[in-house]
Image (tube, rainbow, N blue to C red):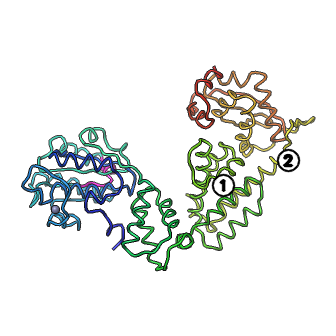
Amino acid sequence: MALYRKWRPQKFSNLIGQEHIKRTLLSSLKSGKISHAYLFAGPKGSGKTTTARLLAKAVNCEVYAKRKTFGEPDDKCLNCKEIAQGRNLDVVEIDAASHTGVDNVRQLIDTIGFAPTKSRFKVYIIDEVHMLSKGAFNALLKTLEEPPLHVIFIMATTEPQKVPVTILSRSQRFDFHLAQRQDLVSLISQVARSEKIKIDKDAVEFLATLSEGSFRDALSLLDQLQSFAYSQITLKTIRDVLGLAQTESIFQFLEHICKGEKEKALKILTDLYQQGVNFSRFCEMLVKVLRDVLLFGANAEVEEKERISKLSQMLTTSQAILWIGQFMEISRQIGLWALPTLPLEIFVLEQTQNQAVLSQEKEEAVIKENPTPIKESLPEMKYWPKVIEKIKPQNHSLWMILQQAQPTIQEEGKLALKVKFKLYAEQIMQTKNKRLIEDIIAQILGQNCILSCVVDDNLPQIRIEEAVIIDGENLQDQIDTIF
Ligand SMILES: [Zn+2]
């Protein structure tokens, strides 16, 4: 049996994490208060279905049958046992994501009037309830308006925003959170100990990181590792089995690109390919490291602090954001390529080409006497984050406005900045500001260009607070400087 099933908690007291939910549910059960509709919202693997089954046990456990209250199931009576095995006739589970889900909802609504066969309540657990069709929701709503006393609905969803308000307003909602790192670590250690799986402490920590807040993923990964029957699970075993790159190569890869070391970056990809590394995972890990760079910039705690700090000195915030988007895109597409390294190799070549141009740039302003106009079009815009970063120390309020501008090349040597507000355009076009931007573009590209501004109402606006968080300075000061 899969570890996740085997170790599914059968009592509230064995449920790890989600303390707020456990406490509220148990105390209302003990005082005999139940709701006829619950909505469990939260990410996958956070324990929604498990809690739903516990709740079903709690209301139908035979220990409480003759009382007016409910409580922690004993996990011994027939009802508890049957519910745990998924064969109790009064507890019906429906997966709305499957195509039979909708029909099942209609059927259950037809039969809802019948009393439970041998329990106090009929419990309907509807998983991924947001997937129900409009018709099914309407039918469900009718039932929720006047639910029979013997019926309890427990609806689970990963996307509560897709559940109609009319349903939400009739349900008692509980929000499940991603599993805490510490909870994942203790679950993995506990299961490993009981199953006599030998695993290093740092390997447990690493598994917790890989499971990204999902109890189910944590135990599925442990299951996968266990099936290889290693005498001891180590960091290396995990990387080998899951086809993961060493953290070291992630950092080296990014550093080489930042330094414009094309050959070294490409060599890493070749080596990883020979080791059979999963490149989609590799991209995810690149994204994670870049995310840490952003968090580090905002003074948040990160793992591998030294390496992250080093990397953050080589990368601008805007560049890190840009790369995150690109790696996410590559990760999605990687399965489409016969050679999985190819999209990453193209990335390396593009980026190191840019870096090569940048390293030619001199510290002092270089404005050529006979400027050559910009020849290429869109690829030049990769330099835009560099331009903005250079402006930051010289004119802070201009820097903030430029973060919201969208550059487009209109024709050779002419760059137009799209901005949302006329006020922004006026600021940018002030002679000294316009001159500053044009000069910095000339420094970076070694080519001159003429700047203009276009006001576009439809442009999305980046909230000023976000820009301030990145910069870590006081919001009011920023607003004062701009206006
Ligand atoms: Zn029981």
> Residue 267 location in percent, x, y?
73, 67
Specify which label sits upstream in the sequence, 1 or 2. 1
Q: Which residue is mark 1?
A: 307
The boundaries of the magenta stretch are 125-133
Residue at 60% from the left image edge and 45% from the top image edge: 294
Rendering coords of residue 279 (x, y %): 59, 64
Note whether ligand 1 is within 8 Å of mark 2.
Answer: no
Residue 301 falls left or right of residue 398? left
Circle 2 packing at 10 Å, graded few (<14), some (14-19), many (20+), is few
Q: How many marks?
A: 2
Camera sees residue 329:
no
Q: Is residue 206 above or below residue 225?
A: above
Amino acid residing under circle 2: Gln
Quarter of the view holding residue 93:
bottom left
Which residue is denoted by mark 2 in the rendering?
360
Residue 268, by quadrant, is bottom right
Q: Alpha-carbon neighbours of circle 1 within 10 Å: few (<14), some, or many (≥20)? A: some
Q: Which element type, helix, strand or loop, lies under badge 2? A: helix
Is the residue 387 above or below the residue 181 in the image?
above
Q: Is residue 171 visible?
A: yes
